[in-house]
Amino acid sequence: MQPPFRLALNAKSLMSPFTGIAQYTRNLSLELEATGEVEIAYFYGLGFSPELRSVPAVGHEGAKRLVRATIPKPYMAARLVQQTAFSLGAARRRFALYHDPNYLPYRFDGPTVVTAHDLSWIRYPETHPAERVAVMNDLFPAALERANHVLTDAGFVREEIIDEFGVAPERITSVPLGARSTFHPRTAAECDALLAERGLTYRGYILCVGTLEPRKNLQLAIRAYAELPRTFRERCPLVLVGMKGWLTSNLESLMQPLVAAEQIRPQGFTADEVLAVLYAGAQALVYPSLYEGFGLPPLEAMASGTPVIVSNRSTLPEVVGEAGVIIDAEDERGLREALLRFDEDAAYWQGRASASLTQASRFSWRRCAEQTLAVYRQVLAQA
């Protein structure tokens, strides 16, 4: 076995509450380390560390707000500082390869791999803050040109990037993500204590997971849920897990009456050990997103033995396969009927739950790491 090669990995996403990119960065890194084939140094914005942080850094949000309020183009100013720190650190450490798991790599004098998770700012610019759209439009094309190889999470996005930017097919590889072992089926006895703390019962609630922002299409879920019989809503609340994102005023107005009636239960950002129980105890996960680069919550719910209802958009049919219930992203009636069938037809629910476990078993973070490592070896061989 060859000695491990030195890998620089941008881990700045781990310094904020965990979104999908942070989960990707952390779980891929853990599995890469386990192979023994790479020696990873993690870049956290101002320097490198051999430590993979397991929890988000805290105390930065106030500083971020101050910077945004006082410095013109704060992202670009911060990026200039970070580029300087990255270049100085990289020069000292002599990395063989640099992987940026978050779209926009720093300049690096060596082979570079970049992961592009989706093109949501192009497909649905209205669902992003305007500053973010401007930054991505400005920097992403050059990032693609600098990269020796591009990774995506799903075949759908790979084809989109080829079509949109003319990337040569041999320079871009789809590597599916995985579900962590913490997401697995649990009995009522294993879930009841935590659920009771939140006023919930096993298989007695509907779950939505994801940052509260327009692209997740939670308004469809809430409108459909609001039209269910009152008796259903009173015994089976809609539980929302995810931090508040952006452009949420319309969503909050729509939610407010049902929140006041305790039929919608916002949980905010939730630790993994709690989320794992919420997945396993739910009657179903609803994920009607307009666009996804992969769709970790549906995969994690399926791995927990919980059936999923997803939209027919982007990568979601690719992830859930025939195990998931797939509806049109604008079909309130279809979503209501799916929820009622899960509630009323135990045999149908059990069939979908069993199929969900089978589908989820096709994905793993170990497999993701092995396929990513194969791309690293290919890039190094061609350097």
Image (cartoon, rainbow, N blue to C red):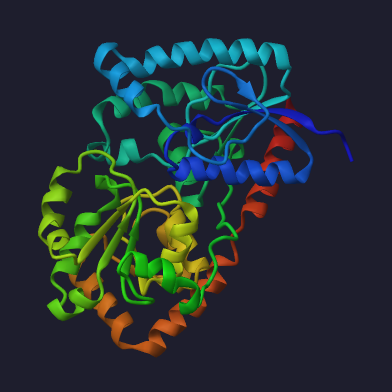
Determine which quarter of the picture holds residue 329. bottom left
Please report the residue visible at 42 percent of the width from the left and 66 percent of the height from the top: 194
Taking the spot 71% from the left edge, 12% from the top edge, the residue there is 92
- The percent coordinates of residue 324 (x first, y second) are 41, 70
Q: Is residue 379 above or below residue 264?
A: above
- Where does the image place residue 376, in percent across and percent down from the top left? 70, 36
Task: Using the image, determine if residue 188 lies above or below residue 315.
Answer: below
Rendered location of residue 55, percent (x, y): 52, 40
Residue 229 in which image quadrant: bottom left
In the rendered picture of this protein, how many numbered marks are placed on residues?
A: 0
Task: Tell whether 56 sits left or right of 172.
Answer: left
Q: Above or below — where is 381 with respect to 275?
A: above
* Image quarter of the C terminus: top right
Residue that lies at the very extreme toward the right in this rendered image:
1
Q: The N terminus lies in which quarter of the figure?
A: top right
Q: Considering depth in this image, is 91 or 184 the residue closer to the camera?
A: 184
**Residue 363, how many percent across, how many down?**
59, 60
Residue 173 visible in image = no
Quadrant location of residue 17? top left
Question: Residue placed at 38% from the left, 68% from the top?
Answer: 195
Please state if 258 lies on the left or on the right of 283 as rendered.
left
Q: Left or right: where does residue 226 sit relative to residue 161?
A: left
Which residue corresponds to the image point at 58% horizontal and 16% vertical from the top-left? 86
User: Is the residue 149 above or below the residue 305 in the image?
Assistant: above
Q: Is residue 59 left or right of residue 72?
A: right
Can residue 123 be seen here? The reply is: yes
